[in-house]
Amino acid sequence: MIHNLDLLSPENWILDLARIDGFRDDYHAIVKGILAHTQRECPEIHGLMEFYNNVSPEKMTNTDILAELCWIVYSSGFRFDIIKKYWTAIRKAFYQFDVKKVALLSNDLETQAVQICNRSGFRNLKKATWCIQNAHRIIEIDRERETQGGLRGYIVDISKNCLYELVELAPQVMRELGFKGIGRTTIFHFMKNMGIDIFKPDIHVRRILRELGLISCENASSLEVCGAMSFLSSVSGMKISELDTLLFVYGRSTKDSIDALCNNYI
């Protein structure tokens, strides 16, 4: 483990950055080790990193937004590989995420949701229903915020906030958007997939940060996680969204263990 980790008491480290600066090289080595391990053992990391390097709020179309909403709604509670297996069929069932076509399905919501379940083979009626409703909501937001650039304009405006402001704004953003299946945690996933440089406070990420001595517990506040992610971003040179993706994929594949890495890289 990191030497003299007791110096990094969770209640002090954010306030006294001078005390943690002495460990920057150690943390840099650990992140480097996590990256090397994940690139070697988890091939999907390359595609995910490329996605988060290229996605941008300014380039998002309503089709892109609905596609990401559907991905988040469907992947909530399910493993990545399961949703990946069904994704082509889900995309086809939702008309390639054509927002206007999907929104029209809300006129006969229950029947159309059942048909989507049948066509996609993924028989989760609630998720299918939510995605239809979200397509309709995208059109509503575009109309409500027409003078501000619609939904994309709203997302671009949000992206201009710093990380701490984004974390504090997340509950408000969730309420204002009003998307079905997007809650207090998945709103972070949504913002991240819109190209906003933010993290999703997933359990894998929290466990690794706790193991690294950067947060007090798995249930630490999002602001505490924010401080930890900011520090690791500064020592690694990685964007917050890249770092978050890396820790998530690594944690999922290793059951959140960092002991071997600490032994090998420190």
Image (cartoon, rainbow, N blue to C red):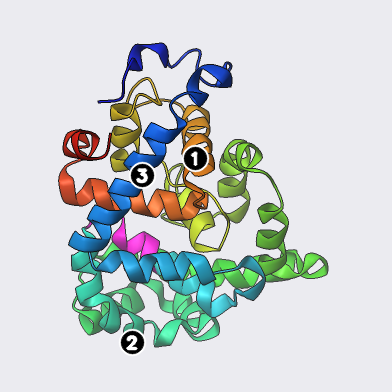
- If you read the primary sequence from the N terminus, does the residue marked by circle 1 or circle 3 appear first? 3
Q: Secondary structure under badge 1?
A: helix
Residue position for label 2: 92
Which of the two marks, 3 or 2, is nearer to us in this view?
A: 3
In reply to whether residue 83 is colored magenta, the answer given is: no
Q: Secondary structure under badge 3?
A: helix
Q: Residue furthest right?
A: 147
Residue 167 placement: quadrant:
top right
Q: Nearer the viewer, residue 29 or 159?
A: 29
Q: In this picture, is 38 found above or below 14?
A: below
Identity of the residue drawn at 38% across and 61% down: 72
Q: In this picture, is 239 found above or below 45?
A: above
Label 1 vs label 3: CA separation?
9 Å
Residue position for label 3: 31
Q: In this picture, is 125 found above or below 29?
A: below
Residue range corresponding to the magenta coloring: 71-78
Identity of the residue drawn at 72% across and 69% down: 150
Residue 218 placement: quadrant:
top left
Q: Residues within 10 Å of mark 2 (few under 14, many from 20)?
A: few
- If you read the primary sequence from the N terminus, does the residue marked by circle 1 or circle 2 appear first? 2
Asked if labels 2 and 1 touch by Cβ distance under 8 angstroms, the answer is no
The answer to whether residue 48 is visible is: yes
Residue 92 placement: quadrant:
bottom left
Identity of the residue drawn at 28% across and 42% down: 204
Amino acid on which the number 1 mark rests in the picture: Val
